[in-house]
Image (cartoon, rainbow, N blue to C red):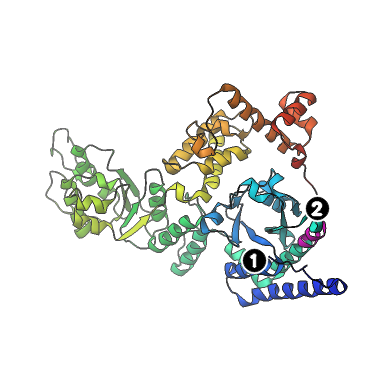
Amino acid sequence: MNSIFDTDSPEILQMKKERAELELLFDIARTFDKHVELRTALGPLLRLLEMRAGLTWGMVTLLDRATGLLKIEEAYGLSAEEKDRGVYRLGEGLVGRVFETGMAVVISDLSKETHFLNRAKNRAREDMVGLSWYCVPIRSGGGVIGTLCAERRIQEEDKQAQMAWDKAFLEKVSSIIADSAKLRERIMEEQFRFRENHAMRDENRNNLDQGGRIATGSAIIGTGNAMRRVYEMLMQVAPSDATVLITGESGTGKELVAAELHRLSRRSQAPLVRINCAALPESIIESELFGHERGAFTGAVSQRKGRFELANGGTIFLDEIGELSPQVQVKLLRVLQERELERVGGTATIKVDVRLIAATNRNLEAEVKAGRFREDLYYRLDVFPLHIPPLRERKSDIILLADHFAEKYAKKNNKLIRRISTPAIDLLSSYSWPGNVRELENCIERAVILSTDTVIHSYNLPPSLQSAISTNTQPTTTLEAALSRLEKELIIEALKISHGNMTASARSLGISERQMGLRVRHYGINWRSFRITKM
């Protein structure tokens, strides 16, 4: 791909370079006037960088103010899944460092840079040999709001001049992005979590007076595209009284979604009554749901209201509804159709005003075909289906969830957890999570308990995560190999913390400088790469 440096006329080289640069900057500035949406403006901008300037794999990250994380807003050539993986904590990796320090980073050979996380594109190291990589801050209003990154493969003889030009040019482009008043307004508007924006509009439209109840207080965590679609549908159905059928694998958080539907509804001040249909024996489930009269059966010494009566005016949540027996299914269908019930052993008809939310990890359509679930009840429940994606389909949320659980259980166990190490993040991101969010929560709780130095390391995580598949490594069976991996990880962590200071790293590990030097050479660790270079 040609660079705007390319020319065969030495006498007018400088003039042509300056003219080409000005024309490109003008076209970039004009791009923002042509597009209304932020993403549609950034796409053509990054395309111009590649086609006209030869800067490939351009990427813009912006701060999500709701989560405090850096997320890829647009990246040229990356798939939607790769973009979802591009989530960075402040100070994490090169992108997080640029945002935190406000200083540009220029890498001469990307394959040798240990701080490069390689998270979004996940390329092999040999594919990055000789690549120059740049990341500059996007400043606005006296602070940093995001980063602009790109890369180029340069011939060695032209490298220093080209790298200097690339850095200066990208800084000019970032200034155009930040100085666009229209874009700056869109950035501020779009940084708030999707569901909160919709909730605020819903609050204004319906003139609700719960003091910000809709906009805040949600227990659901996730900012990826999969969860954004869930938020959008949740916001559409929450104000209504429609029956909602929540589907998804075990551990995905269906009960949290049910609670959020109730919290955002007009029934939020009334009770939310939960019942797990799989947790109760068939002999008492009918009594639990609809209540019973005194003497209705052995042990019924007094009249008792059922869950539907207790939820009157509010919401009832039936979890694992696919486990109901055919007899109970018939009675439930009547409640949904007529909004009335009879207690077990009674004859009086009781009117109830409830909203039903049901959840299941079964495929109810298949259950209907197999004759295990009533077809008419299924269609009564399936008024508004809401599917919760498994955790393996929302990889970009794993780090966010892990941080949340680390903070939660650190507080619960009265421990200080400052961060999750990079190797641990790699393990969490590569694991398939068959148990979904519940399994992730259990793993982080265990890791918090095992941590001894305010950091969650990979060896604090359960052995099930540390497999050859999840880590992309060959399995080892020797103690020596396991100890070597642990020793190397501890040395790298110490060098990261001390920014490449060998003396400080040796002191923190409790070894001599000579021992530190021998181990660094043994493992082939480039300690100089951990130094922070001011650009």
Say the numbered circle drawn on residue 99: none
Q: Which residue is mark 2?
A: 535
Viewer can see residue 413: no
In three-dimensional space, the C-alpha distance between marks 2 and 1, rounded to whole angstroms, equals: 23 Å
Q: Magenta: predominant secondary structure element?
A: helix
Packing grade of label 2 (10 A; few <14, some 14-19, many >=20) is few
Magenta stretch in the rendered image: 160-167
Above/below status of 17 relative to 126: below
Q: Quadrant of residue 40?
A: bottom right
Magenta highlight on residue 162 = yes
Residue type for callout 1: Leu
SS at circle 1: helix
Q: Residue at x 75, y 55 (%)?
A: 104
Determine whether, in the image, residue 242 is placed left or right of residue 153.
Answer: left
Q: What residue sits right under mark 1 in the picture?
A: 46
Q: Nearer the viewer, residue 82 or 421?
A: 82
Q: Nearer the viewer, residue 366 or 323?
A: 366
